[in-house]
Image (tube, grey):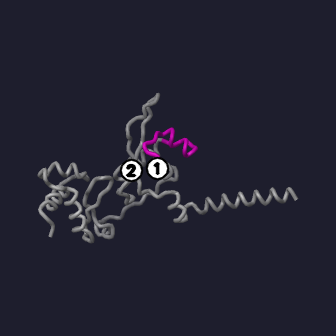
Amino acid sequence: MIGQSAREVEAVLFAAETPLSPQEIALYLAEDTDVVVALGELQAHYAGHGVELVERGGKWHFQTAPDLGHVLRRTREENRKLSRAAVETLAIIAYHEPVTRAQIEEIRGVTISKGTLDVLMEAGWVRPAGRREVPGRPLLYATTQGFLAHFGLANRRDLPGLADLKAAGLLDPVDTAFDRLSDDAALESEAQED
């Protein structure tokens, strides 16, 4: 059984249209309510249930337990694959945000079409984040709460680092190919000297 403060926080979160920060939740409650303690109590209470209380980017909301998502699907979802350009652009924005279009193009080494950013914004993963204070005032792009939620991240610090990517084997083919080229070049150089 949860306490009265936790019940009040629960009611606020169920009625909310969007995720709320502890400060936003506190606006609905008595001043002496410890929202953080109530959130912890609720999170423990809902652990293992059909719905869970989760925190994403400092904001709290209820969501269907990941293992039960299939129960709510009535129609078949059409999975659209992102183009390679969109995936690269999304990764650059996630790791370098806030970032301008010119910076994205510089990192990728090629220009990006306007459609690429449009697709990411339509998916709800990228948003305009103001303008850079330089001549021309280019738009800045950043990831959204939807990006964090879709990829199961609490915040951007949870993005995998270089060591994590190598450990998962995602960078090995590139590294192996590069090492092989370096080894071949060294062998050719030695053969020419002999």
Residue occupying image coordinates x 24% and y 62%: 40
Left or right: 108 with respect to 19? right
Q: How many marks?
A: 2
Q: Is residue 188 magenta?
A: no
Element under disc 1? helix
Q: x, y (%) of residue 69?
A: 31, 67
Q: Amino acid at mark 2?
A: Trp
Q: x, y (%) of residue 61?
A: 25, 57
Left or right: 186 with respect to 48? right
Q: Amino acid at mark 1?
A: Tyr
Q: According to the image, label 2 marks what residue?
A: 125
From the viewer's side, name the closer residue of 65 and 6: 6
Q: According to the image, label 1 marks what residue?
A: 95
Q: How dense is the environment of label 2, judged by Cα within 10 Å: few (below 14), some, or many (20 and up)?
A: many
The C terminus lies in quadrant: bottom right
State whether residue 3 is above or below residue 82: below
Q: Earlier in the sequence, mark 1 or mark 2?
A: 1
Element under disc 2? loop
Range of magenta residues: 95-113
